Amino acid sequence: MTITDITADAPSPHGANENGGTLLEVRDLHVEFHTRDGVAKAVNGVNYSVAAGETLAVLGESGSGKSVTAQAIMGILDMPPGRIPQGEILFRGQDMLKMGKEERRLIRGQKIAMIFQDALSSLNPVLSVGYQLGEMFRVHQGLSKKGAKAKSIELMERVRIPAAKERVNDYPHQFSGGMRQRIMIAMALALEPDLIIADEPTTALDVTVQAQVMDLLAELQREYNMGLILITHDLGVVADVADKIAVMYAGRIVETAPVRELYKRPSHPYTRGLLDSIPRLDQKGQELYAIKGLPPNLTRIPSGCAFNPRCPVAQDVCRTDTPVLHQVTEADGAALPGRGSACHFWKETIHG
Amino acid sequence: MAEPRKSGEAVDATPNVTEVDVVDAGSESASVAAIEAPVERGEPILQVRNLVKHFPLTQGILFKRQVGAVKAVDGISFDLYQGETLGIVGESGCGKSTVAKLLMMLETATAGEVFFKGQDITKLSGRALKAVRRNIQMVFQDPYTSLNPRMTVGDIIGETFDIHPDSAPKGERRRKVQELLDVVGLNPEYINRYPHQFSGGQRQRIGIARGLALNPEIIICDEPVSALDVSVQAQVINLMEKLQDEFNLSYIFIAHDLSIVRHISDRVGVMYLGKMAEIGTDTQIYDHPTHPYTQALLSAVPVPDPDAREGRERIILSGDVPSPANPPSGCRFRTRCWKAQDRCATDVPLLAIPERFKGSDSQAAHESACHFAEEKDVVHAA
């Protein structure tokens, strides 16, 4: 099955494609987990790409495979039970899945860094934050303890932690949730990577702090011209920062689109259902639209389109044929760059 | 027997929460009778006056002495009317979950009163307290930890009947549990299954069924959908709205997600550091907020519509919430407020309709605890 990467054609608002080119490309990635209950197919042929200075948002519910894809990119997937039966992850044109351990280790942290969801459990509680930040410099750049500490203070100032000099020897529990997430961001930024993967970076935070952290992340991204993969389930956060969106369901990308178009005209029934099911702050509706049923069990993904048991427009073809990611066009056939929908009835969904 | 009287200064401080008709029951059985009595729709069913909860901070091992207190809830007052949903929003640590625990009598209040149909439940005991507990039930946040993994669904829901044996005769209980499962949209045949066999959304339905089992009049929902996926959230919210109509329930809906609170609530209270900052109907709070904290909170909510976002003003607060063990003097929000002046550090603003809006028909005329209350629409695009 060859699927061309439609996301790559998306016009980049920062003109990143001209000066940086594609940083990372995931091609037909499959990940499965061998469990007692059978093989859980977590990722089933994912394609996406990110360029320098660009933000790709990967949107999906729990179990959609969005975090597993990120872990596969970082090379931090537990194998076994995880397995990557096929696919390629190209970083600047080189397939990372074919690299040796040592080669990948050099990329991890220096070229691609990751921000995790829960800062409290991702930081080591018995080491000071200064020591943990400095570890990046000591291990990767061979700096002395003193030099590393100076660098840590500099980093903490850059993510706007007040009184960085006094707080560098504090432990994670002495910081508030927002400050801890800033430290996670600082750690990811330490070696000025080309690409940052942020896995639900603000989910555990309050809205006021969430806004601060997202602003900081966006600003630093602009400053360093980094690529950013933002993994989230929150349609609101995505609308604020992303350039393009990939919506995942049951380990596949079901829709890709530039951010504005996705919200204006979704071309997959799942995306439409998601958008309709969130209550709005600025209007009071009647009953909420609810997608019926539950996300599928990954050991028993329905045949055909994985969404068919929950889909309001499903027909017989949906139960037998797996839809590929179709190029979405205007009603008159004019191309819509960067848009794709893995639905047999995308035309009806987008054009009514 | 009923003798109306004022319940102290609290009511004077917040003039437009209605006066409490205190029922002086005298004996326990009279008290129970008052609790069982029906309340008209639109009448206050639960009245909270100046509720305070301080958790002591102690030092020393053998000789513990109190060195301070975490002021989790520091004097809040509100009314809950029969059949309505009161939403309570605020950041983590603002005391909203402590309020829930106080109303459930899971914590003892340091001071203040909670009147359920005119009876101060903080002073009740024995049969009367049990009768109140039966009428105020709770749905918890995390459906993964709030259901005992070693009990079947039938036992989890049926346990409520063991505690209140007169609510259902022994032989009927199993059938009643099955009815409840059906009401919340689960297959009644699942009665012998264990919690791990259900998904998050289904577990929350079990939690709701447990809350409904005793036919309560009030259900307190503490973040009932925040652990659920977006597509499942809508299902649970719709279910809760349906049940409210069907069983004539009053909800206190505690959440940090402002969009969901607006959707489900008739009135909304905004809490900050143990105090109520602003309270009003959903239109008053969301479309005509007058407290700077409410405005900042609303403007920070990411709206899933890139076009609507462009026209919105964004107020980004600096810093974090101060520690409730040592809250700022005067107005608690002043350390993060862009409007703060000298007066805010000395005078505690009262929760009342601001002077300038008094007597006006405008939607801005609702209770707001700010010296410089001013209307500002931050939700709609300019």
Image (cartoon, grey):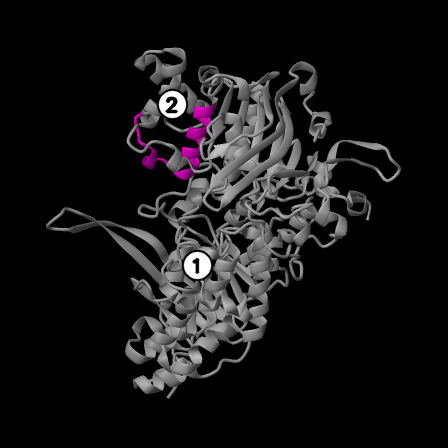
Residue closest to the far left: B62
- Could you classify mark 1 by the number of other residues whose Cα lies within 10 Å: few (under 14), some (14-19), or many (20 or more)? many
User: What chain does badge 1 belong to?
Assistant: B
> Please, what is the three-letter code of the amino acid marked with disc 2?
Leu
Query: Disc number at residue B143?
Result: none
Judge from the rendering whether residue A297 lies leftward or rightward of residue B172; answer left or right: right
Measured from the top left, where is residue A24 in percent x and y?
Answer: 60, 22
User: What chain does badge 2 belong to?
Assistant: A
Measured from the top left, where is residue A265 in percent x and y?
Answer: 75, 43
Q: Is residue A99 above or below residue A295?
A: above
Residue B368 visible, this orientation: no
Element carrying mark 1: helix
Element carrying mark 2: helix
Marks 1/2 in contact by CB < 8 Å: the verdict is: no
The span shown in magenta is A169-188
> Please, what is the three-letter code of the amino acid marked with disc 1?
Pro
Judge from the rendering whether residue B183 lies leftward or rightward of residue B211; answer left or right: right
Residue labelled with disc 1: B195
Residue B163 visible, this orientation: yes
Residue labelled with disc 2: A133
Q: Quadrant of the C terminus of chain B?
A: top right
- Could you classify mark 2 by the number of other residues whose Cα lies within 10 Å: few (under 14), some (14-19), or many (20 or more)? many
Foreground residue among A291 and A283: A291
Q: Quadrant of the N terminus of chain B?
A: bottom left
